[in-house]
Amino acid sequence: MTELAQEMEVVFAGPSEELSVGSAAPGNSKLKTFLLAFAVVLFNAVGNLCLAWGMKHLTESMGWNPLGYLRAILNPFVAGGIALLILWLLTRMALMSWADLSFALPLTGVGYVLAAVLGRVFLDEAVSPKHWIGTLLIFAGAAIVGTTTHQTEPRPEPER
Amino acid sequence: MKWALLAVIVGCTVLADLLQSYEMKRSGEQSVGARGLVRLLRLAVSRRYLVLAIACMAISFFAFMALVQIAPLSFAVPASAASLVLETFLAKFVLKEAVGKRRTAGALLVLSGVLLLAR
């Protein structure tokens, strides 16, 4: 009974002061946050690639015509790209619930490197030799941000 | 046309991310299993700020679709990264996040890398 009472007290009191700064909330570790960020990056890069591939192979120009966009969605690459981008949206929402915006953004910046590489390999887009320096800077920036605490404040318990 | 589309993309992305981050922090840590994704989908259509965020993302997305038709992906994606610094700045002052020297330096490094990739 005493143990239960203590447990209830902890649950209702919420996270202790020690949790508020410097450590993650009980739910998700930093490693899990990195893995989720990687999934977000992957969905976005592959989704964008599919979309760009599909759009580049359309015969009509889009402009501001809404019907043109609707017809574009029927293209399998555009449709696949959109499906991946929906998955990207949902996983990104989860990432935002786990980590600060200013932590998640530079981390997902690694996706820019992936986009450039995929653009070069699959779409024959020209990428200048400077892109290796750019890549290095992006990874360095993401690594530096990765050393900071991923949550400024602990999150409330999600509603069920 | 290229720059007008880019301005729409950046403006809508910044607003969408701020709204999304604010609302998702309030909703608690969400899981990413099959059930979690369904729950996230429900959240996305039931929370006012998330609906607004998704509307902004949709505008940004269609502007992006139009942009990749007239410019290479290796321009379109990195150029839209201009939102990164603006968002880090606003995360500190609007969302009250702990943006210290390391996060600022990291964001600036990522931005300079993205700009190099864009050329």
Image (cartoon, coloured by chain):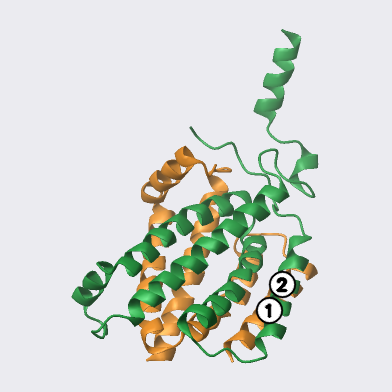
Hey, what amino acid is under mark 1? Thr
Residue B107 drawn at (x, y percent):
69, 73
Residue B12 drawn at (x, y percent):
44, 72
| Quarter of the figure that contains the N terminus of chain B | bottom left
Position of B97 compared to A58: left or right? right
Residue A158 occupies quadrant? top right
Position of B118 compared to A74: left or right? right
Q: Which chain is orange?
A: B
Residue B4 drawn at (x, y percent):
40, 88
Q: Which of B12 and A62 is in front in this view?
A: A62
- Residue B100 in view: no
Say if A132 sits above or below A24 in the image: below
Mark 1, secondary structure of its residue: helix
Residue A52 occupies quadrant? bottom left
Seen at 64% across and 66% down, the residue is B93
Say if B85 sits above or below B117 in the image: above
Q: Which chain carries label 1?
A: A
- Residue B82 in view: yes
Q: Nearer the viewer, residue A17 or B37?
A: B37
Q: Which mark is residue A85?
A: none
Position of A134 compared to B17: left or right? right
Instruction: Please say if the residues under marks 1 and 2 sit with CB atoms less than 8 Å apart.
Output: yes
Chain A is shown in which shade?
A: green
Residue sitting farthest toward the left? A67
Residue bearing the label numbered 1: A135
Do marks 1 and 2 share a subunit? yes
Hey, what amino acid is under mark 2? Phe
How many neighbours does mark 2 have within 10 angstroms: few (below 14), some (14-19), or many (20 or more)?
Answer: many
Residue bearing the label numbered 2: A139
Mark 2, secondary structure of its residue: helix
Q: Mark 2 lies on which chain?
A: A
